[in-house]
Structures are given as structure tokens and as C-alpha cells.
Image (cartoon, rainbow, N blue to C red):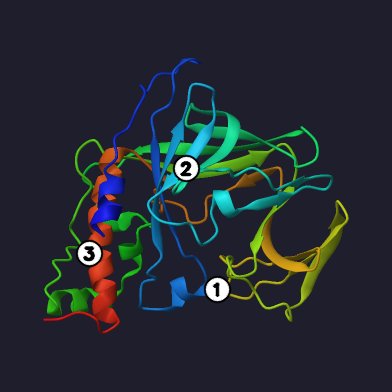
Amino acid sequence: MSAILAFMLASCGGNDQDQEAVVPDNLYAVDRFTGAVDAESTFVTPYVNGKIYSFDENKNLYINYSDLPIFKTEVLRQIITPDHLFLEKSKHIERYKYWVGSSASFKHDELSYSLSSDRQNIPFILSWKYKKLDVSGRPITDDSNNPIHRLGTTAQIMAIIYGIGYEATDTFPQGSVCWQKQSASSSHEYIEFYPEQIAPHVEDTQDIVRSGVWNNVTWIEFQRQEGESALANIKLEIEGDIYWGFYHFKNESLIQVSDQLACDFMNETAFTAFSDSFSKHKKVNEALNGNGSK
């Protein structure tokens, strides 16, 4: 845990100016397991992985993780469009640091970067628009991306019993900023996909919605059942291997629940507060699993 917290407190670089030559500040985020268990279980999943997005003077985008990424995240993602495969994009730099894309920028609260296909130098541009929010003074549990947000009454009682110090009134300190996803766009419609063991997915016995063949790869979309919105529902087979993924149109709205806070990116101040809540989350999780001690 101390290693994770030390990582989370890493310093930022650059200036928050809107000039082409200025390297953007670092952005902070968290990967966590998503799947049906999130909505149905009182227990909080143990997989939470902090990450820092950084940019260099050549407009390359990197992600430095606090631990080895093992669930669906940018550096494990593969992409297929109607005409091209984009696979060789997440080059390992060192330890848990990876290159993600080129021609990267974060301006006007919009992140964009470019990929290239494996066989041809054909750019594929991805971008996301965000809403910048001053969350100073807001309860940290308001953030729907925070694992503690999912703790119910039972978990709060357990936290009190085990003397963990969980406080629903813990707030983001002054100067805390979050960026919340509003929409996404890309230069082509695409499917992002992962090895079967990485992405939680629906059963392939469910009703087929549609299917297609892209770049000689057949894909099948299966119907999601109630409560399965976070599960992958596109099945692909490539050279005998099975993958599961998500279909994306060229333009998508990403607002799931109106007025719900989701810190998709944070500044260092907010992320440090988040890391503290994660420490509490881990203790609560251990207590709920019978590993705590009075």
C-alpha cells in the first residue's frame, strides 16, 4: 500500500496554459475492475490501479501505472475498424510505464491522440471531451469512480465496528479538480477488444443482435441483460483466439446518469485525497472479507 500511495503522490510537470508548445500537466486516474459484481455485491473489488498520464515535448502520451495493469485499460486494448487493425500501440517503456499514442494534446478540456495501424501508417484519431469541475469541499464518496462510493450501509457499519476511521463526510481539499467525460469521437467507428480473461463479458448463449466482418475478422454482438451494461458484448475470433470487446460509433455521448459525479481525470490534489480514501477502502474490504481485526 505504501508503494501505491508513494506513486499517487508523484509530482506534476508543465504549466496549465493553452499554448501549442507547452507540455500539458499530468493527469491522474484510476483503473478498477468493472463488471456485474460492482452493482450486485456488498464487497468491494480489490483491483484498483492508479495511473498517471504524461506528455512529452514531442506530443507523445504515456501512462505510468502504480501496479501491473491486468484488466481492461488503454495499454491492453486492441482496436479494429472496418478496414484496419491497431495492435502495436502500447509499447512498454519501463516497469509499469507505457507509450499510448502520438500527436497527443489536452487542450480546452479535450484529450486527443493518434494511433497507427500495424501494417500501414494510417492515423486513427481518438478524442474525448471533458467537463472541468472544482470539487473542493465535496464529499469524496460523491465520486462514482471511487470504490468507497459503492460501499453500502453494511460496509459503513463494518467500518465502524473495526475502527477503520471511515468517514462519509471526508471531503476533497481546496484546489481539487476533476474532469468528467462528456463525449467521445474517433476518425472511424471501431471495436475495442481484449483477451477473454481480461474483459468481463456476457454469455455467448444470449441473443445475437448483429454481426459483421471487418478486415477479415468476424465479430458477433450479443444482447446484454439487465445489469450488464459494463460487460463486453462483442465476441471476435482472430487466428483461433477469442476476444471480447465494445462497439464504438464515431460520435458518442458518455453521460450515463445526469448530475452524477465521476472523476475520470483528477489533478494531483484530488488524486492524493482519492488515494487516502482508497486506503480506507482497502481496510473496509479486508474487514468485509473477514481479514480485519478488532
Q: Nearest to the eye among marks 2 and 1: give it.
A: 2
- Spatial separation of the CA atoms under disc 1 and disc 3: 27 Å
Q: Residue at x 71, y 72 (%)?
A: 223
Q: Nearest to the eye among marks 1 and 3: give it.
A: 3
Q: Nearer the viewer, residue 52 or 232?
A: 52
* Label number found at residue 280: 3
| Residue at the front extreme of this rendering | 94
Asked whether, in this view, residue 33 is left or right of residue 14, the answer is right
Q: Residue at x 54, y 39 (%)?
A: 99
Earlier residue among tags 2 and 1:
2
Residue denoted by label 2: 63
Residue denoted by label 1: 227
| Residue at the bottom extreme of this rendering | 290
Q: Nearest to the eye among marks 2 and 3: give it.
A: 2
Q: Secondary structure at mark 2?
A: strand
Q: Secondary structure at mark 1?
A: loop
Query: Is there a contact, CB below 8 Å, between mark 2 and mark 3?
Result: no
Q: Amino acid at mark 2?
A: Ile
**Image spot of residue 149 (x, y percent):** 33, 63
- Spatial separation of the CA atoms under disc 2 and disc 1: 30 Å
Q: Secondary structure at mark 3?
A: helix
Question: Can you tell which quarter of the image residue 89 is in?
Answer: top right
Q: Amino acid at mark 1?
A: Gly
**Image spot of residue 183 (x, y percent):** 57, 42
Q: Residue at x 36, y 72 (%)?
A: 44
**Rendered view: 251 above or below 5:** above
Report whether residue 153 is seen: no
Q: Nearer the viewer, residue 67 or 251?
A: 67
Asked whether, in this view, residue 231 is left or right of residue 163, the answer is right
**Image spot of residue 153 (x, y percent):** 26, 76
Q: Amino acid at mark 3?
A: Lys
